[in-house]
Image (cartoon, rainbow, N blue to C red):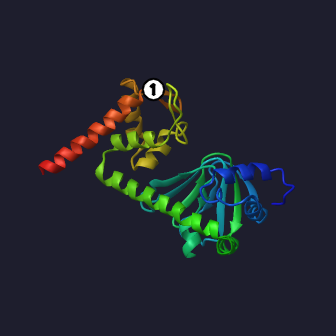
């Protein structure tokens, strides 16, 4: 990518949203951008499979990409990360030179930058601020994995759906939009909480009847945030009470 590229301005804006690259100065950012390749990927593009050699690091300018693990026997998938503008992946194999640990699939038309693994290693060595930013970003992903593991083992599907909605809420209007997931199919949402489409559909219809959610086709918004918070809080209070009595 050259400095005259029409995509440079958009890529720089995405860098400013990135927890990894936003702390770099403009010269450092431009140096990395000039080493990148730019791609537009249609929805449902498979970038790599679990077990593939890790040769490239990707940075998202726009769109959403899911990182998922697939059960080879059942074909069911569990989405571990839903990434968007400003995210870089896959960080773990970037650091340990191992194979990809997950599948990466686009959900939308995505604009991404790609960089050979050897090149990002060189930038990390040459740029102390980049080196320093990688570990907190990786730490955030590890914390997210730990939270998901706890939810899968300790909560029911209704609570996992409610927590998913709360994590993605955006805005302070009467209708709060769960950003990144508001227009996903029930099947995609099911893959994020370890269940199936029919179960998600049942829970969403129940929340809609209670006046907590507004839905229209694939669109979801939260109408009553207080009621949604109360449902989650009461579930955890009950779990705490039961653990004390056991």
Q: Nearer the viewer, residue 228 or 48?
A: 228
Residue farthest to the right, as pictured? 4
Give the image quarter of residue 91. bottom right
Q: Report the side of 153 relative to 173 (left or right).
A: left
Q: Position of residue 59 (x, y in %)?
A: 66, 58
Residue drawn at (40%, 39%), measured in percent from left and top?
200
Q: Is residue 98 visible?
A: no
Q: Residue at x 70, y 62 (%)?
A: 114
Q: Is residue 137 left or right of residue 210?
A: right
Q: Position of residue 197 (x, y in %)?
A: 43, 41
Residues 75 and 120: in front is 120
Provide the residue designation for mark 1. Answer: 223
Task: Say above or below: 25 vs 17.
Answer: below
Evaluate whether residue 77 shows in this view: yes
Residue drawn where x is 61% and y is 71% of the image: 54
- Callout 1: few (<14), some (14-19), or many (20+) C-alpha neighbours within 10 Å? many
User: Toward the viewer: 107 or 115?
Assistant: 115
Q: Percent position (x, y) of residue 120?
A: 67, 70
Query: Which quadrant holds the N terminus?
Result: bottom right
Q: Is residue 69 left or right of residue 240?
A: right
Q: Is residue 191 above or below residue 73?
A: above
Nearer to the camera, 213 or 68: 213
Measuring from the top left, give residue 130's x and y in whole percent: 63, 66
Q: Residue 33 is drawn in which quadrant? A: bottom right
x 62%, y 54%: residue: 18
């Amino acid at each position: 990518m050259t400095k005259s590229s029409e995509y440079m301005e958009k890529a720089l804006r995405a860098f400013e949203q990135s927890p990894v690259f936003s702390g770099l100065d403009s010269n450092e950012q431009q140096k990395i951008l000039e080493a990148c390749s730019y791609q537009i990927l249609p929805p449902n593009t498979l970038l790599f499979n679990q077990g593939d050699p890790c040769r490239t690091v990707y940075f998202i300018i726009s769109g959403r990409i899911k990182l998922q693990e697939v059960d080879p026997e059942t074909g069911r998938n569990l989405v571990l990360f839903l990434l968007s503008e400003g995210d870089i992946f896959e960080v773990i194999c970037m650091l340990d030179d191992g194979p990809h640990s997950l599948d990466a699939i686009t959900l939308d038309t995505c604009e991404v930058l790609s960089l050979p693994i050897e090149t990002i290693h060189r930038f990390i060595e040459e740029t102390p601020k980049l080196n320093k930013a990688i570990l907190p970003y990786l730490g955030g992903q590890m914390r997210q994995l730990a939270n998901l593991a706890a939810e899968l083992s300790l909560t029911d599907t209704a609570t996992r759906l409610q927590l998913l909605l709360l994590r993605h809420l955006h805005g302070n209007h009467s209708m709060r939009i769960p950003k990144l997931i508001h227009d996903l199919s029930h099947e995609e949402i099911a893959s994020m909480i370890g269940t199936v489409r029919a179960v998600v559909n049942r829970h969403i219809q129940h929340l809609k009847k209670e006046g907590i959610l507004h839905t229209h086709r694939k669109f979801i918004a939260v109408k009553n945030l207080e009621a949604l918070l109360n449902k989650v809080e009461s579930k955890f209070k009950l779990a705490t009470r039961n653990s004390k009595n056991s």
